[in-house]
Image: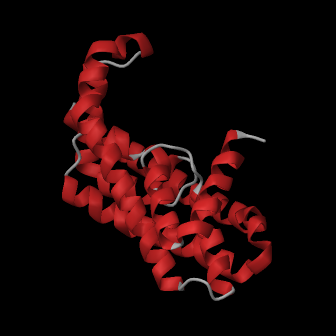
Amino acid sequence: MSLLHQLGDVAINWINSIGYWGIFFGMVLESACIPIPSEVIMPFGGYLVSIGHLNMIGVILIGTLGNIVGSLLAYVVGHWGGKRFINRFGKYVFLSKKHLDDAEKWFEKRGEITVFLSRILPAVRTFISLPAGIARMNLTKFLSYTALGSLIWSGILAYVGYILGNNWENIQVFLHPIAYLVAGIVFVILVFLVVKVLKGKKVSN
């Protein structure tokens, strides 16, 4: 059994034992860069709603709150330790002060859309808080767009779990089309932003 499956089983046991708090702690850990998959936590919460054990609004809100808390923890780690770590060891992984400066400028100008879209992308959503913290993105904006993106993601997963009921583990069948659609939208937006930046540089030169 893979590590992700084992961690998913741990999250299910937590939710079975302590309900909403299990969802909260699982989502905190996922957003703090510990790979407990929300694709297991929230659909299982939705399934429990379908059999009358939990409330849908409560499941979505507690999942969103867990995301916010975990993201804040990862942001703080990046904010206070990430920059010093990269300044000291970045050369070993081809990162320089210029890369940090570029990242800070990126998050200053485009941090909102970056954080928001990342929150509804599998895998990326788990780790986006670290670079946001390293780049010293405005904390109020970071938390606002984290909350919005997390609310949408948690809502989608919980609702699909509710619809699937006993078959909630088959959520990947539903997620793949959504993931491809979102990935396509993100790709188009990133291309637009890169082209815009390059045009801006040509004008300034």
Most extreme residue toward the front, as rendered? 17
State how the image is colored: secondary structure
Q: Position of residue 171 (x, y in %)?
A: 73, 67
- At x 51%, y 55%, the residue is 186
| Quarter of the image where the N terminus is located | top right
Count of marks placed on residues: 0
Horizontal side of residue 16 vs 133, given as left or right: right
Q: Position of residue 92 (x, y in %)?
A: 41, 10
Q: Position of residue 175 (x, y in %)?
A: 68, 64
Q: Quadrant of residue 180?
A: bottom right
Q: Quadrant of residue 165?
A: bottom right
Q: Position of residue 148 (x, y in %)?
A: 38, 69
Most extreme residue toward the bottom, as rendered? 52
- The residue nearer to you, when weighing 146 against 5, is 5
Reply above or below: 59 against 9.
below
- At x 42%, y 68%, the residue is 64
- At x 22%, y 30%, the residue is 205
Reply above or below: 35 against 146.
above
Q: Quadrant of residue 168?
A: bottom right
Residue 80 seen: yes
Reply above or below: 205 against 14.
above
